[in-house]
Amino acid sequence: RISFYGYRRNNLVTFHFSSPFIIMATTMTTTMMLMLLALSSHLLSVSAEEPKAAVSVEEGLGIDVTAAPPSGDGGDAVIEEEGEDGNMIALVGQKDNPCVGKKPLHGPEEGDEYFKNVQCIEAGVKQALEQAGANVTKGYNGEFDAGDRVPIVTSYKEAGLCPVNVHWHLGAEHLSVGQFDENGTGPTTTRRRRRSRSMLAYDDEKVRLGFQCNYYNATDEKFTKPFDWKHCEGMQVGQTYEVHWPHSAAGMCGTEWQMQTPFYDGVFCKSGIISLDPLNTFQKIGVQAQVYTIVNDETYYNDNLLNGWIEYPDMDVAKYTGSTTGTTRSNEICSRFTPITWQVDRKCHMVSASSIDKLCEDMKAQKADMSDDLHAHGARELVADQFAADNHQRLH
């Protein structure tokens, strides 16, 4: 049983966060329960008009948070879990996967689905901490007071994290003016998503397109010549994609189960690493983000995109704390999976279609079923200034 308690300072019990999360674990026979610790929204008092206000809670109030298991019995049967886009996905042959079902769902009360998205503001009160993806243009800083939370400024490897997933979004979720922004261009039409293994039908739904890069040239065949995709689904030459590599210190690093879909399972797989005393979610969980325009040109080939971004000379990386992303979130609906570190390459790059198809091939070869990440997910709308952290770091 894990409980969360406030501390007293000058007769006021204060915290500088509203919905931090934590993974702890307790063993009950052979069942491992993932435990997340959070403050329920009715205990928070972050003013929407005064984003830098502290959060106060009643002293000694403990909240227990648990996770719900996935449905299905493993083996060759189908296991259902919520995917990146909010729909149910099917995982096959995952009976022995130690990370299945580790995504937290429930909070203070059994079955309350606390960690589902929430209204960003209710009755003038912010219901979640800083969000992502934000503006990462040089010189930008958000307005949400992150208190003493500072993102990881070293490489994730140096910080003891490993990649636990890779997926991408159609267009950029982040904004870097002059690199990927509202003036970017691409093919005149975008592919529609086909989800043959999904629990829901999305064949006729257009994926939301984010910001685009400025490379596209309709008269240059490397941006227009079709590519024979063998492993990825619904990808398009000339289009912009933002690739994410979630990292975690609680992943099954160095094992056959390191890479997972959905990525939450990989992030929260191991217990006893992510903690609240002291709060370290933004020190133990991070995402790399790099934006590409896909070209049909082998000059831009890279054969290893599974384990992280391409290291370019003189990279200019924005580092800040935020949340998980995706089109189930907006400036009205916020994620409660926050705070985590984001490291975002501010420059757009070209990469060959064959590189991305090789990535999909590598994903198919993983022990975990990563089939739901072989296509582009929709891009979240840009985070409003009031929800973006004020702790942006500019480091090369």
Image: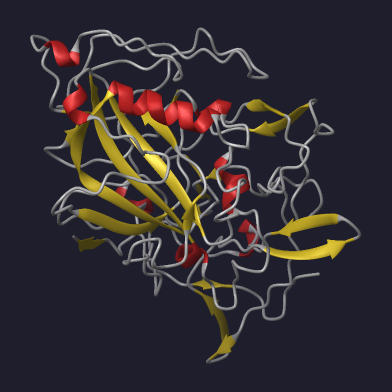
- Along the line of sight, the residue nearer the viewer: 281 or 50: 281
Quick one: quadrant of the N terminus?
Answer: bottom right
Residue 33 x/y as whole percent:
78, 56
297 shown above or below 38 = above
Tell me: 68 left or right of 57: right
Q: State whether residue 142 appears in this view.
A: no
Tell me: 263 left or right of 68: left
Residue found farthest to the bottom: 10
- Along the line of sight, the residue nearer the viewer: 42 or 379: 379
Residue 220 x/y as whole percent:
9, 12
Tell me: 250 left or right of 204: right
Residue 203 x/y as whole percent:
53, 9
Q: Residue at the location (55% across, 31% down)?
A: 365
347 shown above or below 295 = below
Q: Residue at the location (62% across, 37% down)?
A: 367
- Along the line of sight, the residue nearer the viewer: 394 or 43: 394
Residue found farthest to the right: 29
